[in-house]
Image (tube, helix red, strand yellow):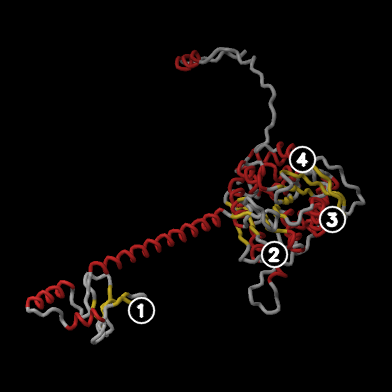
Amino acid sequence: MPSAPTHTAEEAHLLGTMPVDPMDDIELRSVQLQFPNARGSILEACEQRRVPTDKGDVHVAIQGDTSKPAIVTYHDLGLNYATSFAGFFNYPVMRGLLENFCVYHVTAPGQEEGAPTLPEDYVYPTMDDLAAQLLFVLSHFGLKSVIGFGVGAGANILARFAHANPDKVGALCLINCVSTQSGWIEWGYQSFNARFLRTKGMTQGVIDYLMWHHFGRNPEERNHDLVQMYKQHFERGVNPTNLAMLINAYIHRNDLHLARTPPGTPGAETAATTLKMPVINITGSLSPHVDDTVTFNGRLDPTNSSWMKISDCAMVLEEQPAKLAEAFRLFLQGEGYATPLSTPASSPCGTKYHTYSSIFFANFREQQLQAAQERERERQLQLSLRIGNRLRETAIDCSGRSSDSSNSNSSNNNANNDPTSEDDLDAENGNGNGNRAYVTTDTSGTLYFGTQSNKIRITENPLPEPISS
């Protein structure tokens, strides 16, 4: 029989200070798993629709006021609209931004939550067919033009749709977009994944590949809870057969056939080989698709596209939602969709908006114009007052002498019993040599005072400047 443990005096003192209440009466109740960023709220806020197409029905979830400009989203492999965009579009910055937009979440056939298994004879649409299905969606809801927001495979589908229908897309925000056909390594891994999904269901190897596809390497070191949540989704929330069909369509994709054509290249047109609309191309620094986004960026027109790599993340929507929301908001502002006007005007997506910078500079130019006009009025007023003072203070006779000297000469003449000098008579009567005083201006607006033979220019100097006739 083992002996009772002995404690030192210090241990006994510490044990004596600990509470002696029994712990058996503590019970945990109502323990529930809470998803981050209120993911369930998007299911309640969205209106669910089934849109018929030539390749079967497509599930569309509508979030927001349908009278506002439209944003169309498309998800990545193994996800649907709820698991891919719920957290991001419920982010506080995005909730405020979406007051001016309506979001149409498009889900690929058979990928929605709780979708039944597609029939064995069902021919799954190719990537081009999935892009063509968006025409049915736009026609069903009466949308003339949209803003595309896609991730991974969804970004590739939206890029195909924008290239084939440039008048239907006003702008594109693409995350981890691949513009080339699949390589041998990707094709081999995904072919095995599709085979296992059909025969064995969701295996651990398929889950590991999907986790690498979305999060890159060692995702547990960055966000363990997020990784566990997505693993549970892949295990329980995905129909394996339907996912195998989508993966098979993705690895058999063809090249987008985009090429950046420099201006002035003979025999080529930029509009026919690359995307016309503005594009923001985003990736995460830890994503396995960084090189693919660089290749895609090299095929875009640099005048209307930008490439952005967000640090410390692979799945940008989940790991860095604040940075992505700010980038998307600024992108929309740059295209004129962020600040609504009081009166709508024509735009690629319905209501046209002015950017904050354009409004600021318009007001700044108006203020500068008003200030310049005020300064001109003040200058004209000061100039007229200055000229009036010069004319009143400076009295000049026809010979160029001041009024004081003329008065002294006339006094001397009076003292000498000479009633009036000859020059004064001539000046008074307007005859003699014709030296009549007058004020005139030249073509430049300069004032002159004097006679034709002796003129004096009136300037801002204290004394008038005599000039030669």
Which mark is nearer the camera, 2 or 4? 2
Q: Which mark is residue 442?
A: 1
| Quadrant including the C terminus | bottom left
**Contact (Cβ within 8 Å) of mark 1 with mark 2:** no
Q: Nearer the viewer, mark 3 or mark 2?
A: 2
Relative side of 439 to 133, left or right: left
Secondary structure of residue under mark 1: loop
- C-alpha separation, residue under disc 4 versus residue under disc 1: 94 Å
Q: Is residue 183 at all visible to an observer of this figure? A: no
Residue tagged by mark 3?
125
Ranked by sequence position, the earlier of labels 4 and 1 is: 4
In the visual, does 416 lie left or right of 342? left
Q: Nearer the viewer, residue 37 or 385?
A: 385
Task: Return the disc, 1 or 2, that comes first in the chain's sequence.
Answer: 2
Q: Residue furthest left?
A: 416
How many C-alpha atoms fall within 10 Å of the one at disc 2: few (<14), some, or many (≥20)? many
| Residue 363 image point, x, y percent | 51, 56
Q: Secondary structure at mark 4?
A: helix
* Amino acid type indicated by mark 2: Leu
Q: CA distance from mark 1 to mark 3?
A: 85 Å
Name the residue rendered at 19%, 80% in the picture.
424
Q: Quote the CA–CA distance across marks 2 and 4.
A: 38 Å
Q: Amino acid at mark 4?
A: Glu
> In this figure, which residue is indicated by the disc labeled 4?
235
Residue occupying the point 57% across, 51% down: 311
- Give how far apart the Cα atoms at labels 1 and 2 are: 63 Å
- Check the image and report above or below for 311 versus 235: below
Q: Nearer the viewer, mark 1 or mark 2?
A: 1
Q: Which mark's residue is nearer the viewer, 4 or 1?
A: 1
Q: Earlier in the sequence, mark 1 or mark 3?
A: 3
Task: Give the x, y percent position of residue 144.
Answer: 76, 56
